[in-house]
Image (cartoon, rainbow, N blue to C red):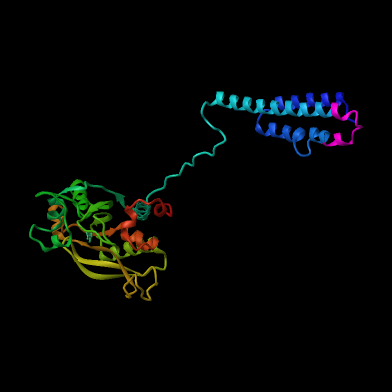
Amino acid sequence: MIDEKRLEDLKEEALKEIRGAQDEKGLEAARVKFLGRKGELTQVLKSIAKLPPELKPVIGRLANQIKRELEAALKEAQAELKRRKEAFLPGVDLTLPGRPYLLGKLHPITQVMQEICEIFLRMGFSIATGPEIELDYYNFEALNIPPDHPARDMQATFYVDEKVVLRTHTSPIQIRTMEREKPPLRIIAPGKVYRCDSDVTHTPMFHQIEGLMVDREVSFADLKGILTLFAQETFGEKTRVRFRPSYFPFTEPSVEMDISCVICDGDGCRVCGHTGWLEILGAGMVHPNVFRSVGYDPEEWVGFAFGLGVERIAMLKFGIDDIRLFYENHLRFLEQF
Ligand code: DAH
């Protein structure tokens, strides 16, 4: 049976637990233990009804008073916990969820560019670079494109002034490298290029990778072998290639290389214009005039060159149909790569 002594003991025990709680969880446990629906004090309050009539008022009053005291102690303990936390980190609510830190990734164009460069590095090519603001001489003239040459119309050039342009292709790096180094050489040159052009397949700035191999005995067969291997490493072992005759002023003969369509595997679809083939690069044997402009003897040296558009390859690899997506910088797009 309940008496005053038991109630006082219960109160002491409860106060001890409430004041000793180290955190909110401990405090809540103490509240439930004594004041919860099945708590010890709650049980006492419920059992008062069964007491002899003369005891009811005394025990009842005491139990209710203890309940109020415990509730006050709970509030005080809660305030104390909060004070302690604030003293530790003022103004900081440690119970708030943290801010996520997003992990940065390489841009899909950077990824594809690195991947392609690695393929050629494995084949013994090394990397060369050149300026994006380029002399007309390197961008055109030394590449066998004189001032009135119609090939200048093939590329809508941004002119800085009469003699300076934003390079329209990475081919001027061929000239700069050959001026600097003696043959034999084997380089690739990745970089940004600029043309006044903008639609679903063209942006005013895009990326190219140029290749150049010069030696005493380089043949068209080497060109075909190396570019076929590149296509298969980039698009998969089963990729087929074909070479079509083409024209570039700095190569003779010139070709364009197609790969079997990555979407329909050659059956014909919308992406390949129902031909089964996709053009992915231009190439050819270095024109003797190009060698002459850098002081290489065309009787002694032969070479092949190629140039490819990185965005186009990335679009084919990832199945993207609008080049502008690469440069709108929407995270929902970029995060997929
Ligand atoms: N420079 C050419 C362009 O931008 C691409 C190209 C074609 C580069 C043939 C070459 C080459 O080195 O041999 O359209």
User: Quadrant of the image for the C terminus?
Assistant: bottom left
State which region is magenta.
46-58
- Total marks placed: 0
**What residue is at 13 percent from the left and 60 percent from the top?**
152
**Does residue 52 sit above or below 153 in this rendering?**
above
**What residue is at 76 percent from the left and 39 percent from the top?**
37
Q: Which quarter of the figure has residue 29? A: top right
Nearer-the-camera pick, 14 or 320: 14
**Does residue 1 sit above or below 101 in this rendering?**
above
For ligand 1, give the image quadrant.
bottom left
Q: Which quarter of the figure has residue 207? A: bottom left
Q: Is-magenta flag for residue 94? A: no
108 relative to 34 in the view: left or right: left
**Does residue 267 sit above or below 112 in this rendering?**
below
Q: Which quarter of the figure has residue 62? A: top right
13 relative to 218 in the view: left or right: right
State the image coordinates of residue 239 (x, y, percent, origin top left).
Answer: 39, 68
81 relative to 282 in the view: left or right: right
Can residue 120 be seen here? The reply is no
Nearer-the-camera pick, 133 or 67: 67
Q: Is-magenta flag for residue 55? A: yes
State the image coordinates of residue 203 (x, y, percent, origin top left).
Answer: 26, 57
6 relative to 155 in the view: left or right: right
Can residue 96 be seen here? The reply is yes
State the image coordinates of residue 225 (x, y, percent, origin top left).
Answer: 32, 64
Magenta segment's dominant SS is: helix
User: Quadrant of the image for the N terminus?
Assistant: top right
State the image coordinates of residue 149 (x, y, percent, origin top left).
Answer: 10, 61
